[in-house]
Image (cartoon, grey):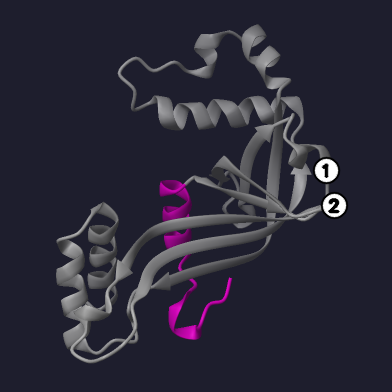
Amino acid sequence: MFIPKLYRSEDFDLMKEIIRENAFALLISSAEKIRATHSMMILNEDDPENMYVETHISRANPQAKTLKDGDEVLCDFLGAHAYISSSWYDHMNVSTWNYEAVQIHGTVQLMNPGELYQHLDKLTSKYENFQKCPVMVKDMGKEFVEKEMKGAFGLKIIPTEIFIKQKLSQNRKEHDFQNIISELENSDENGRKIAEKMKLIRK
């Protein structure tokens, strides 16, 4: 990911927020050929000094058939994003896009059955907690879950490089910056979220 210095962030709390709120991300690999799979990801923070990404894909997925321990992959997370119209400036300029994103380059460690079971338990708990009648992994019965696990390919991605991008019109003068916020506040949910982020960087 190309990140001009103005948009580069070293804020790991922001990274965690983007991953937490945009967990359905892209797993990209290049073993044999370039492949990409949208998959649910979760950041394992059991050891804060050695965080890593957990995910799983279908064992029938061609990507699963090529990945092995030590392979390099890329996890791509797109956060809030919004179109910025050139009509919002007080001068002639081009339209653009404001957004937040995280890319994690890492090496693969294949999960053993116990790790995969714990991963599915954590992932299910994260999303079932908000349901009217939550169904947790423990409610499904170990025999059923282990049978279903045979079709899942669990991965741990150990980070080697982390890139955090926060492109929020930092290069705009104050009048245009505030006008962009006003326009975004009257747009969709993503636009309003970007507006709030913009307010935070110029407090």
Q: Quick check: 192 left or right of 21? A: left
| Magenta residue check for 9 | yes
Q: State the residue at coordinates (52%, 61%).
A: 102
Up the image or down, 112 lies above or below 173; here it is above
Q: Nearer the viewer, residue 6 or 111?
A: 6
Q: State the residue at coordinates (44%, 84%).
A: 6
Q: CA distance from mark 1 to mark 2?
A: 7 Å
Q: State the residue at coordinates (22%, 71%).
A: 199
> Tag 2 or tag 1, which sits nearer the N-term?
2
Q: Quick check: 182 left or right of 86? A: left
| Magenta residue check for 133 | no
Q: Quick check: 111 left or right of 52? A: right
Up the image or down, 38 lies above or below 160; here it is above
The amino acid sitting under disc 1 is Thr
Q: Position of residue 187 (x, y in %)?
A: 20, 59
Q: Nearer the viewer, residue 72 or 31?
A: 31
Q: Position of residue 165 (x, y in %)?
A: 47, 70
Q: Position of residue 74 (x, y in %)?
A: 66, 57
Look at the numbered disc 2 and give the secondary structure of its residue.
Answer: loop
The amino acid sitting under disc 2 is Glu
| Quarter placement of the C terminus | bottom left
Q: Quick check: 62 left or right of 125? A: right
The residue to which callout 2 is attached is 32
Can you tell which mark lies on residue 175? none
Region of the chain picked out in magenta, as a range? 1-22
Look at the numbered disc 1 and give the secondary structure of its residue.
Answer: helix
Q: Position of residue 5 (x, y in %)?
A: 49, 84
Asked whether disc 1 touches disc 2, contact meaning CB atoms under 8 Å apart, the reply is yes
What crowding class fits label 1: few (fewer than 14 Cα within 10 Å), some (14-19), or many (20 or more)?
some
The residue to which callout 1 is attached is 66
